[in-house]
Amino acid sequence: MASGDIAHHLVNWTIGSGFWTFDLDTIVMGWVLAAILVITAMVVGSRLQASAPSGMQNWLEGVVDFIDDLVQGSFPVKDPLIAPVAMTVFLWILLMNSMDLIPAYLPGMVAHGFGLTEFRITPTVNLNTTLGVAVAVFLLMIATNLRVKGFSYFKTYLTHPFGIFLAPINIIMSLIEEITKPLSLGLRLFGNMFAGELVFLLLAMLPWWGGLVMGEVWSLFESLIIILQAFIFTVLTVVYLGMANMQDH
């Protein structure tokens, strides 16, 4: 694979221009994977076996137990919203990350069959996706703060961390602290997934035997990264929503 081919695999299928540019491949894959997640949950839910769960039901129940233990072990709060949100975030990001394990040339070949010159199959290598999910979590955190604490939530902007007499500085510091939450969520996920994609594309430039051996090794390592990044994003989501449920003292 030549350097020009690498650049080709780093270009999205887009429409529009400037601010109104839409990455259609990211949008399509995000919705397709979300639909797969919803349909799978509906099918498994319609065939629940209480006595001896197996297959997908067994795996999903393990994820539910994991998320439930994570939520209960993190914060002594009872919010029925946190666990479903955390599970949705974990499974959706895990699915989107997993697309990175598909060989880079296959999506291009399929896309060319439909007359498309560019198509990136992994939504989380697009900063729009990772920041979009992070902003959604951030807005949910703000809504939870308002639901639990009311408008007294905004008092923290005036008094934290230096007291009411330094309110202007407190507002600036609090805004910086709040803004860094979605930024760190989105940029961490994007950076790790984008780096993994670059490594795959660079390995594709090796001779076929080198690419085959090193590709298998890197695929195993990338599998851990895929799971780890979904886990980290989910843990931080639980932390932010759990903190929003705690009353200030």
Image (cartoon, grey):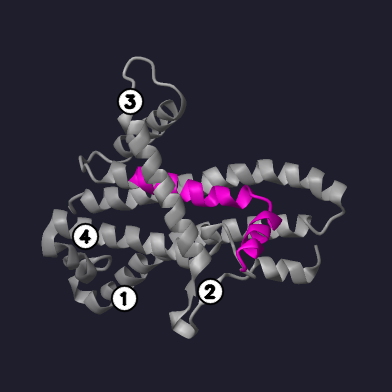
Cα–Cα span, label 3 and label 1: 51 Å
Q: Main secondary structure of the magenta part?
A: helix
Instruction: Specify which label sits upstream in the sequence, 3 or 1.
Output: 3
Foreground disc of the pair 2, 4: 2
**Apparent side of residue 118 relative to residue 39 in the rendered image (left or right):** right
Cα–Cα span, label 1 and label 2: 37 Å
- In the displayed structure, 111 sits above or below 226; it is below
Quarter-wise, where is residue 191 in the image?
bottom right
Q: Which residue is mark 3?
A: 48
- Marks 3 and 2: in contact by CB < 8 Å? no
Spot occupied by residue 16 in the image (x, y as percentages of width and height): 48, 81
Foreground disc of the pair 3, 1: 3
- In the displayed structure, 98 sits above or below 180; it is above
Residue extending furthest toward the top: 51
Q: Which residue is mark 1?
A: 172
- In the displayed structure, 237 sits above or below 161; it is above
Q: Secondary structure at mark 1?
A: helix
**Apparent side of residue 35 relative to residue 168 in the rendered image (left or right):** right
Is residue 114 magenta-colored? yes
Q: Secondary structure at mark 4?
A: helix
Res. 143 mark: 4
Spot occupied by residue 27 in the image (x, y as percentages of width and height): 46, 63
The magenta stretch is 86-115
